Image (cartoon, grey):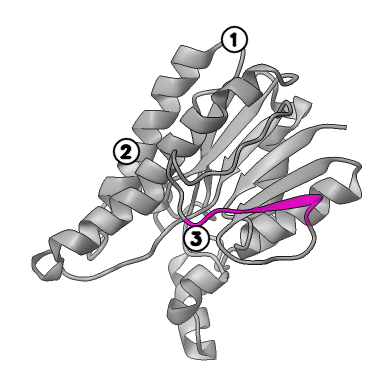
Amino acid sequence: MSTYLFIGASSAMAQATCQQLISTGHRVIGVSRSEVNGYSDLLIAAEYSLDQLPEITEKLDGLVYFPGTINLKPFHRYKQEEVMNDLTVNVLGAFQSIQKYLPNLKQGSNPSIVLFSSVAASTGMTFHSSIAMAKGAIEGLTRSLAAEFAPTIRVNAIAPSLTNTPLGEKFLSTPEKMEASAQRNPMKMVGTTADLSNSIEFLLSEKSAWITGQILHVDGGMGTLRG
């Protein structure tokens, strides 16, 4: 049995992955700003920062950082506070969470860290400048930490395209929007929480023991294929 820590435990992706891991005998500790069911243990954190994250004394075999944002608009309309919020939620929160629980991960068995990037970090998309900047930083952090922590701790990131989760709900809120998004994807599909939870489970498991420093594109080919 492995013990995993999920930061942002209330997200749909986190809950789906938690159910998969617990069903196969693992333990999942959730850190969340709000109450959520289904975790082996739930720890409430007011904010994701070093002075707000709860203390954990036990060893961890993996950490997944789920919090993210989708704030799309023309470049000239972004306000500095919006850009800073994207950077704080996506990048600084991940940085602080890893720094906080690094001693616990060092005690784990083949520990693994999983972060989230976006297809927008590697593919130029209009109205994505703020989130692309934040997720580009996540990809740099992934590779840097993978080099620094090897061979003890593996670090990888998942880069999805638009996925049918509450975070992307406003872009998929009608059948017409769902169909339009599916048609833009090479696979003619919109991603699901299962697509992402399967990838997270793989990167946490021993099946990916020789994989680190990688950006796994779970995007239906959106980032690399053109029709």
Across and down, in percent, residue 191 comes to: 59, 63
Spatial CA distance of label 3 from label 2 is 26 Å
From where the camera sits, is residue 29 visible?
Answer: yes
Residue plotted at (54% across, 65% down): 163
Q: Which residues are magenta?
A: 39-46
On residue 151, the disc is: 1
Across and down, in percent, residue 5 comes to: 67, 41
- The quadrant the C terminus occupies is bottom left
The residue that mark 3 highlights is 186
Residue depth check, mark 3 versus mark 2: number of the one nearer the observer: 2
Which of the 4 image quarters holds residue 15?
Answer: bottom right
Q: Secondary structure at mark 2?
A: helix
From where the camera sits, is residue 192 visible?
Answer: no
Across and down, in percent, residue 42 comes to: 71, 53
Question: Does the magenta-highlighted stretch encompass residue 41?
Answer: yes
The residue that mark 2 highlights is 137
Q: Secondary structure at mark 3?
A: loop
Residue plotted at (59% across, 21% down): 103
Taking 60 as reference, is 189 left or right?
Answer: left
Across and down, in percent, residue 152 comes to: 62, 12
Query: Does the CB distance between marks 3 and 2 fall below 8 Å?
Result: no
Question: Does the magenta-highlighted stretch encompass residue 84?
Answer: no
